[in-house]
Amino acid sequence: MDTPRTGEFAHIGKSVVIKGELSGSEDLYVDGVVEGTIELQGNNLVIGPNGQVRANVNAKGVTVQGKIEGNIRAVERAELRKSAVAIGDIFTQRIAVEDGAFFKGKVDIQREAAKPTQAAKPETQPERKNPAPVASGAAVGTGSTNPSSGTSVLKS
Amino acid sequence: MSSAAHSFMKLFRGSGESQGVKPAPAAQRLTRRSSGLGELARMLQSEEPLCVLDIGSTSAGNIRYLTERGHKIYSEDLLEASTDPDLLIKNDQGQRTLDDKKFLTENLLFPGGQFDIVFCWNLADYLDESLVKPVVAKLWTTMKPGGMLLAFFHTREAGPDAPCYRYHIVNQDTLEMQHIEARRDVRKGPTGAVHSSIEKSFRLQRVFNNRHIENLFRDFSSIKFFLTRDNVREVLVVR
């Protein structure tokens, strides 16, 4: 999920500020400021290098290059790039963290993808107090591809 | 302990630079064997999911290593958090210090008895003096009885410019060490302005001797030292 080309993603530019609930059924690139919630059922979210998101996020895949304060629920995959500042818990099947990324929170690797209907539910409570069991199959970081766990690779 | 540590530091700073450890280039990673991690590995092989807290710099390798084994990992980079300019206050003597109470209202916000394992790495050597004891006391409360904490302490021979490393778990008794530098853009002041007072890299604040370390962890039930060949003592502490 690299930086999207124009036309592939809906684009929120860096001068845009949105407060409230943001939902959609297409991939979204946020380079501006969003406060509230972001619901992208079955679609990908990219927070660009200028993006500042203060929201709980639900999406198929989430890539963070900028800053996010809030819980990330990525049904398939979460990526923290080296410029990322992520404060909040991450719930996903697979996670990749580049060296240099700042992360404060919990990583909860989930064996099976959350069902779309569940994923679409907004997260209103901090999940820290509800420790869900963690399963194997996690894959993180800058290492090589791991076929058994379906890991892909990030190069810093 | 503060004055003793400071006097020890003076002694330490008087030592020859030639004994100092030179940092590896940022991209380069050094490998070291870790007896302390080897001891912890038995616990990490547990079938039961463990709750692990890593208070070193964010490490993708550690997240991978632990989550692949079914454990839950919490990450908090306390050294980076301590560079928040908003923490600066003046004490009774008018000296600049860090507000430990404010620090603990923003960090380590966990319920008591949550963690089975805490990776402290070399935090205590680089953290500001005012935060060391409060942080260790807070860690004590967040750990389960019987929980284990792994920490590294430099010896005097390491030299005053001993580099600060990010530690990556490679396998049950091997670590990779990566030289880290402070980020400048993690924290912003209340006005949103980026503060540029943060030094480029972290500097060794003091050197603990064995007695200091025992004193620091006196509330814990046991402490075990591992001597290494790279001027670092590994310490495994049981809550």
Image: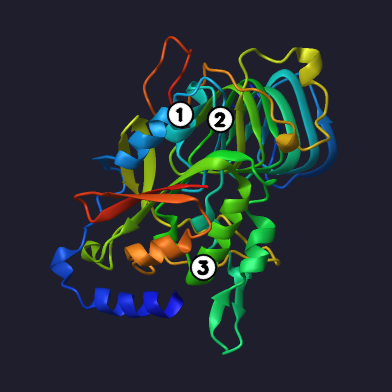
Pointer 1 residue: B44
| Pointers 1 and 3 in contact (C-beta within 8 Å) | no
Residue B50 image label:
2
Spatial separation of the CA atoms under disc 1 and disc 2: 8 Å
- The amino acid beneath tag 3 is Ser
- The answer to whether A114 is drawn above or below residue B67 in the figure is above
Label 1: few (<14), some (14–19) or many (≥20) C-alpha neighbours in 10 Å: many
Label 3: few (<14), some (14–19) or many (≥20) C-alpha neighbours in 10 Å: few
Camera-side residue: A128 or B35? Answer: B35
Picture residue at 44% right of the left edge, 65% below the top: B215
Picture residue at 47% right of the left edge, 48% below the top: B56
Pointer 3 residue: B196
Which callout, 3 or 2, points to the residue nearer the camera? Answer: 2
- The amino acid beneath tag 2 is Leu
> Of helix, strand and loop, which one carries label 1?
helix
Specify the subunit that label 2 lies on: B
- Residue, far front: B221
- The answer to whether B48 is drawn above or below residue B174 in the figure is above
Q: Quadrant location of residue B12?
A: bottom left
| Pointers 3 and 2 in contact (C-beta within 8 Å) | no
Q: Is residue A120 left or right of residue B143?
A: right
Q: Quadrant location of residue B75?
A: top right
Specify the subunit that label 1 lies on: B
Pick whichever of labels 1 and 3 is earlier in the sequence: 1
Where does the image place residue B225, in percent across and percent down from the top left?
A: 32, 51
- The amino acid beneath tag 1 is Leu
